[in-house]
Image (cartoon, grey):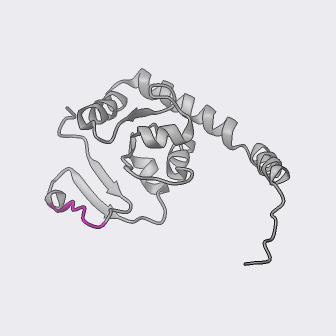
Amino acid sequence: MLRWETRLTVAGYVAPGVTLDRFKTHPRVTLRGPVADLMPLYDVNRVFVAPARFAAGIPYKVHEAAAFGIPVVATTLLAGQLGWPDGEAIGAAEFTDAPGFAARVISLYRDENLWTNTRAAALARVSAELAPDLFVSRVAALLRRQEPRTTNPQF
């Protein structure tokens, strides 16, 4: 368990039907809602938590947090989309495993070596996987591999 000196800032979209009202008056929880620029939050928080249950595409907020040097705990869904195994560049647990998810957050928060190693591994993954030249070459290769579309005169 994290002690009284820790705080949780919740920023971002909350799905319809999900309520965080029970935390509105909690002294250690700040509900920010959607935030256009997370950079000020990266400067004052130790762990980025991405508890997405559903996702499509690239989890760019996880990349962004990692690029800013904030270790991430995410659902196995997001870690799988990234191809980042639990315990290396990311802490990951099933969204249905609240105790496991919380344990990863607590471990990253408390264990300086784990925090440092996870941060370094995530920074290395972001550098290797998202370098601008590499990105351009991968997109170009994908475009070259596209099969020409055939037109059907019936449509």
Task: State how many labels appear.
Answer: 0
Side (left or right) of 43 relative to 28:
right
Image quarter where the C terminus lies is: bottom right
Side (left or right) of 96 relative to 66:
left
- Per the rendered image, the range of residues in magenta is 16-21
Q: Can residue 73 be seen in this view?
A: no
**Residue 97 in the image, given as x and y percentages of width and height:** 27, 36
Q: Residue at x 46, y 57 (%)?
A: 38
Q: Can residue 47 be seen in this view?
A: yes
Side (left or right) of 23 relative to 15:
left
**Residue 49 in the image, given as x and y percentages of width and height:** 38, 44
Furthest-top residue in view? 113
In the image, 147 versus 14, the foreground residue is: 147
Overall secondary structure of the magenta section: loop
**Residue 19 in the image, given as x and y percentages of width and height:** 21, 62
**Residue 116 in the image, given as x and y percentages of width and height:** 48, 27
Q: Residue at x 43, y 28 (%)?
A: 115
Q: Residue at x 32, y 42 (%)?
A: 95
Furthest-front residue in view? 154
Image quarter where the N terminus lies is: top left
Rendered position, 36 above or below 83: below
